[in-house]
Amino acid sequence: MNQPVDVDVLVIGGGIVGLTAAIAMGARNYSVGVLDAGVLHVDEVISNTRVYAINSSSKQLLQELHVWQHLKASSSAPFNAMHVWDSTTDAAIDFNARDIAAPMLGTIVTESALKQALLNTIATYPNIRLWPNCPIDAIHRESEMMHVSNQEGVWQSSLLMIADGAQSAARTLLGVSVTTWPYNHHALVATVNTTKPHDNTAWQVFHPDGPLAFLPLSTTHQCSIVWSTEPKKVQYLMQLPEEAFNNEVSIAFGHRLGDVSLASTRHQFPLHMRHVKEYVGPHWLFLGDAAHTIHPLAGLGLNLGFADIRSFISQLETPGSYFAPKKLRAYQRQRKHAVWQSIILMEALKRLFSHTTAPLPAIRGVALKLCNQLTLIKRLMMEHVG
Ligand SMILES: Cc1cc2nc3c(=O)[nH]c(=O)nc-3n(C[C@H](O)[C@H](O)[C@H](O)COP(=O)(O)OP(=O)(O)OC[C@H]3O[C@@H](n4cnc5c(N)ncnc54)[C@H](O)[C@@H]3O)c2cc1C
């Protein structure tokens, strides 16, 4: 490949956010290239265990891009209620779709199904080309074009949409720094069977050392669990024999869904807050985990990536070229502010539930009970995450 490949938009990273961004731009008739370090196939083993709680704005974006229509019904599960409680005081708060006059609060979707739906949608666009196994090595700007290269070749484009994930190589190549801190939690993710039905409800218990969530899957007695806790405890849980693990999860969850039994392998993810100091520069922008990673306790991370895409495509409605500096700056203004709000909210929730010294648990218990009575407050909370 001697001549540079010329595209209007070059997306770096073909994860869920990169593929969605490619479709959003392809649907607007731009020629799009996607470079990904991996195979760009669906990895059933890992991807079936990873699930996302998709909120209503994200679903709407995927519907507008005709991706939702490609999702297999059996791999998505709507949930219409959330039950959250504090293990120290047992105080709880319930959210119900009825409170916001919505048919559901969100949908749980497996990563494999979502990725497959994105790849199937891309197959209908002749103006989107994918380059798998193509990790980038260098980025530079030359006469108002960005050039990206590796051993396979060179690509040039007026706009780089960078979505190469939390460890973004593009971030390093462009010299963009991040604000970061560790959450001192790892997340253990697995699929489990339960002896009681999940009632299309998302469940989460907050322990002082971190939250344990049960997300309802399409089978009535199956959930995906996300247990975020101290790294040492996650190591211990990862190595426990299956029966002992089942017992630990059932106890930590207060047997709310009866007895739990493991139905998949266990995976763990270290958790860090990261937020880029610059979302944009001349002819480039960051989105998805390349721009921000947050604690999964509210299932917001991917939804923030979709909100990045929505924010940028709304700029395309304004006059000027798609890579105009003022559009990029407006995108940065919107996203920096909104993402900081979510980062602060996650930090506040994590800290609020970690205190065990009196009188904090008692105050927390009363506050939760009070919030549970106040439909208006609950509606505002649901609208923030929806
Ligand atoms: C335990 C856990 C539970 C979560 N639950 C939820 C949830 O319920 N709801 C929710 O909204 N979010 C959730 N999240 C967050 C969500 O997983 C991420 O926000 C989302 O996967 C980010 O997608 P992405 O496409 O930005 O990045 P990634 O999925 O990391 O994709 C990055 C892509 O870039 C490619 N790449 C990497 N390096 C290069 C390179 N050098 N050159 C080219 N390509 C490269 C990779 O191969 C990959 O395909 C959760 C996160 C965790 C850890």
Image (spheres, rainbow, N blue to C red):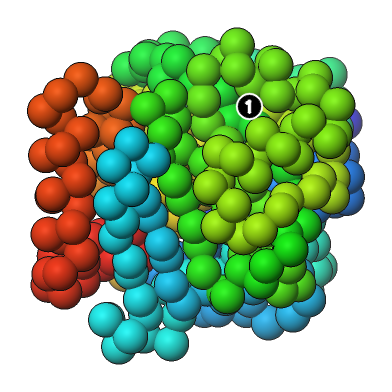
Please indicate whether residue 92 sits to the left or right of residue 140 in the image.
left
Q: Position of residue 22 (x, y in %)?
A: 61, 56
Question: 274 above or below 90?
Answer: above
Q: Quadrant of residue 187?
A: top right
Can residue 133 be seen by looking at this rendering?
A: yes
Q: Which residue: 77% across, 57% down?
A: 193
Q: Residues within 10 Å of mark 1 (few under 14, many from 20)?
A: few
Q: Secondary structure at mark 1?
A: strand
Task: Locate the C terminus by quadrant.
Answer: bottom left
Q: Nearer the viewer, residue 4 or 203?
A: 203
Q: Which residue: 84% across, 36% down?
A: 243
Task: Locate the N terminus by quadrant.
Answer: top right
Can residue 10 be seen by looking at this rendering?
A: no
Q: Position of residue 78 (x, y in %)?
A: 57, 76
Instruction: From the image, tell me which residue sits under label 1.
Output: 269
Q: Which residue: 15% across, 30% down?
A: 360
Q: Which residue: 11% across, 28% down?
A: 359
Please indicate whether residue 374 sits to the left or right of residue 85 in the image.
left
Whether disc 1's CB lies below 8 Å from ligand 1 is answered yes
Q: Position of residue 52 (x, y in %)?
A: 59, 55
Amino acid type, residue under disc 1 in the picture: Phe
Q: Nearer the viewer, residue 293 or 124?
A: 293
Q: Position of residue 198 (x, y in %)?
A: 61, 69
Q: Quadrant of residue 226?
A: top right
Please indicate whether residue 298 sits to the left or right of residue 361 in the image.
right
